[in-house]
Image (cartoon, rainbow, N blue to C red):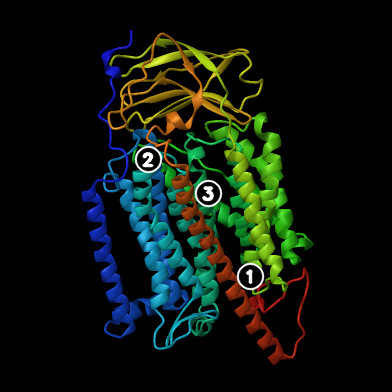
Amino acid sequence: MFPASLRAAEPSSVGGAALDQVLGLSVGAAVVTAVLVYVAWAHRTHRIEWFQRLGDALHARTGEPGWASIPALFVASSLVVALLGFLWDVSLHAGRGRDEGPLANPAHYLILYGLFALFVAGMSAVVFPRDGQKPGIASVRITRRWYAPVAGIFIAACGFYALIGFPLDDVWHRLFGQDVTLWGPTHLMLIGGAGLSTAGIILLHREAEFSEEWKRSADNHSARTLHKLTLSMAFGGLLIGLSVFQAEFDFGIAQFRMVFAPLMIAAAAALTLVAARLYAGPGAALFAAFFFVIVRGVVSFIVGDVFGQANHVFPLYLGSALLIELLALSRLKERPLVFGAVGGLLIGTVGSVIEKFWNDAVFQFPWPRDIWLESLVTVVPVAVGAGLCGALFAVGLDGRLPVNRWVGRSIVVGSILVTSLAVANGLNATVPDDAQVRFTVQQVGTEDEPEVMVQATTTEGLVDAHPTWVQITAWQGGGAGVVTQQLRRTGPDSWETTSPVPIGGSWKTLLRVQDGRMLTAAPIFLPADEALGAEEVPAEAEMTRDFVPEITILQRERELDTSPWLWGAANLVVLVCSLAILAGISVAVARVSGAIAREGRRRREELESGPGGGDGVDEGSGAGRA
């Protein structure tokens, strides 16, 4: 009944990259690094002048000094390229499975370029100032006559943090096998470094506003207009960076509980949109959301329609942006921290409802009643914390951080803790004991492209009346091979497909059930995999399969029996690096804010005007912002 074409395709390797690829990447990185070190040394010792001329030319157009305009150019190009490469990479893994190494996947070249360019952007800000020049208002002293903008240092740190994710990823695969999921710890380093760098570029723009070059361009209206446009786009870039964590939901192949979807959307929206509106002014939140939609739409078209890979969709954020713009019409805008908290509350509640309508219309799976209460309990505090952090970012850029430093520190630490608890709750999934499913499988495809219709009957009472999903997922079948289908309920414990699903070849086809905290799966067809030493799990006309943890099927390449001490230590290293990056942006914002506040006090003393107040924040200068 099931033809010979069900035999699996030739398996790919498991574990780290081949040594020739490791050697090639190492040599290539060493050569590029040597060239960059030479350029930096030659520029600072006046042996070359083209780098200085490039900065001067960009200054003439943007009004910003070279140490800000050059990094902005690099970051803009690097993040667009890295985003395209990243989403292409996710689609390739979803459609084809694991690859043979970092050089065997074309998307990796785009990611590597993007991340390396990000590191170069930060370092260009660090090395550009020379001859004792103090860039911006919060420069950091490196040597006796070398000062660097603090935001440039942070951007370079983000690039380095993301770049070391590549070799660490290879080490991770050698220790624990390949984790074919976006949320692998080293994968999160690649995403987090690139995403947070956009906050660094916003901060760098702010430092540039206190430079002598910027003051001299006061009459250059085109430069000022371009600066405002670039700043608004940077907030849109921050929204894109924070939304990349949701990509598995965008592709309809999430390996985690659905409660994460509204949580991540609300957190990204609250932090970015609150900060954009408070700092960049009227319309900035809507502009950031529109910029997000345009960029993600173009990338989605390229990956799905031009490259022919798995299609994906994305959140909209326009409803949340409109809520923030309307809230800014109230007097709460004069009290930034209260504005951030209320804005986060609105996004976590009303914004989530608006986003649900969009999600249920275009995403693979709706947000069911099963997750509503849990989402309310977790999304609202996370969104409020994110809104407060967004407000802190905005007032920090204006030099108006709370006078009591423990207020800001408590908000940041508290938000991280609340988010960590929400994430821990989302990761808390259960697997039923002794639960099974009986399949009846009917072949309806051809010998070359076998497909089946499936009827499934689960253990009595396993699923309640409103499960999150009962679906069949078939993926990694080659090309754009991702098929997900919500099953139609035919009885209290029985379900059936509404259209054929593929099996055979390299397809991995399984029944997935999520109901409350239960997250489990049963295989329908799995190919043999010589590299894993795994035998084929054949599809039969009548068969009974046990429900098992999803990870054992979706991530067959994982080594699940490794030492828990080794696993814990490896995750601890990633956690420490991630917390260091979060501490870095907090310190950088505080340093810039403190410098702006001191400059504001100096100006007020000169003008003999009194200090402002309100909401317990030091007004600083605000650089004349409304």
Name the foreground residue: 418 vs 139.
Answer: 418
Residue 55: horizontal and vertical position, in percent?
38, 77
Residue 515: horizontal and vertical position, in percent?
61, 27
Q: Secondary structure at mark 2?
A: loop
Please state which amino acid type lies under the numbered disc 3.
Ser
Q: Look at the image and tell me whether residue 317 can be seen.
A: yes
In which quadrant is the N terminus drawn? Answer: top left
Res. 534 image quadrant: top left
| Residue that lies at the very extreme toward the left in this rendered image | 20
In which quadrant is the C terminus drawn? Answer: bottom right
Distance in Å between CA atoms under marks 2 and 1: 41 Å
Q: Look at the image and tell me whether residue 229 can be seen.
A: no
Please state which amino acid type lies under the numbered disc 2.
Gln
Res. 378 image quadrant: top right
Identify residue for label 1: 396
Please give the name of the residue rendered at 22% of the width and 55% of the height, measured from the top-left corner.
Answer: 24
Q: Secondary structure at mark 3?
A: helix
Q: Are marks 1 and 3 in contact (CB under 8 Å)?
A: no
Please give the name of the residue rendered at 31% of the width and 38% of the height, measured from the top-left corner.
Answer: 14
- Considering only vertical position in the picture, is 108 above or below 284? above
Q: Total number of numbered labels?
A: 3
Question: Of discs 2 and 3, which sits in the foreground?
Answer: 2
Identify residue for label 3: 243
- Considering only vertical position in the picture, is 552 above or below 342? above
Identify residue for label 2: 178
Distance in Å between CA atoms under marks 1 and 3: 23 Å
Please state which amino acid type lies under the numbered disc 1.
Gly
